[in-house]
Amino acid sequence: MKRPGPVKAYLIDIEGVLVRDKRYEAVPGAVEWMTSLVAAGRPFCLVSNNTTHRPCDLVGDLARVGFPVTESHLVGALGLGMGWLRARNKGRIRWLGTALLEDYWREEGFEIETKGSCDAVVLGANPGLEISALDAVLGPILDDGADLLCLHRNLFYLDKSGRRRLGPGAWAAALEALKGAGQVVTVGKPSEGIYREGLKRVGVAPGEALFISDDPISDLATAGRLGMRTAFVLSGKYPDHGVLARLEENEWPDIVCSRMSDLDIQEEE
Ligand SMILES: [Mg+2]
């Protein structure tokens, strides 16, 4: 068992920690570990960059394989992105994420434009994204001053077959380099807002929280900088700790373990 020290609450990434990839099969031991966490009365929330599922479907898929989670546990990039747009009255968007969520955006009150101007170009994970779709937002970004809203900036993710696919972070880098007149905003990890939202949800100070993720670059570096303890699990994107060579030593996670069930659930001090 790895002992993270006194921890009052847990902030937990979903893909690569609870489930392996977009197939949503549970990581061995993860359901039992989460069940023990709930039995121990530890507050937790799921801090997720998922942009391919409706929030109710995301937690529904997790509950179906046995995780004791509800929508109230979710702090997601999709919800934060919608909140950012609503707060600024930006209702007309170009959605570059998966077509499966177009209806969800509309149900939430947004208009999805497919040509002409828009308030914001919105990036989410999309295995079907074609270069022509990126070409089509050059006008809004370069000529109309549309904002670029990145739901997150993960450089890649694992699809349903476990294959690495370029993520919104890669497309965001390309579109940001255009230097359009609009704002470039990221609401999901690694942007700090989603971490603060998670801390607010569980009601603890950063030093009392443990952030668990399979991504030390996109997820854990920010958590550590904000003062949280961090655990890097090898059950997702990275099969070994070699990736840490890409980080400065002061950004390394506090704990590296093969899966979340290797972590000791801390008793109340
Ligand atoms: Mg992950």
Image (cartoon, helix red, strand yellow):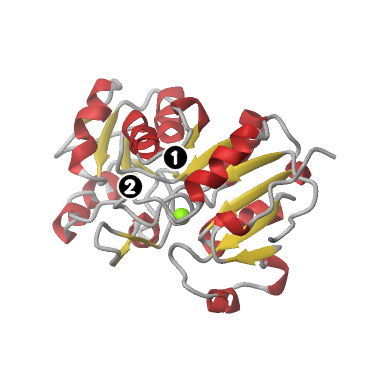
**Which residue, given by chain and number where applicable, does mark 2 sit on?**
124
Does residue 214 lie above or below 98 as drawn? below
Would you identify the image quadrant in which residue 94 lies? top left
Cβ of disc 1 within 8 Å of ligand 1? no
> Which mark is drawn over residue 61?
none
Would you identify the image quadrant in which residue 207 lies? top right
Q: On the rendered image, what quadrant is the C terminus found in? A: top right
Q: On the rendered image, what quadrant is the N terminus found in? A: bottom right
Q: In this view, does 117 lie to the left or right of 5?
A: left
Q: Which amino acid does label 1 sit on?
A: Ala
- Disc 2/disc 1 C-alpha distance (Å): 9 Å
Circle 2/circle 1 CB separation < 8 Å? yes
Closer to the camera in the image, 24 or 1: 1
The image position of residue 145, as x and y in percent, is 34, 42
The image position of residue 128, as x and y in percent, is 18, 54
Marked residue nearer the N-terminal end (2 or 1): 1
Q: Which amino acid does label 2 sit on?
A: Gly
Cβ of disc 2 within 8 Å of ligand 1? no
**Which residue, given by chain and number where applicable, does mark 1 sit on?**
77
The image position of residue 51, as x and y in percent, is 34, 43
* Residue 193 in sight here: no
Q: Is mark 1 on a helix, strand or loop?
A: helix
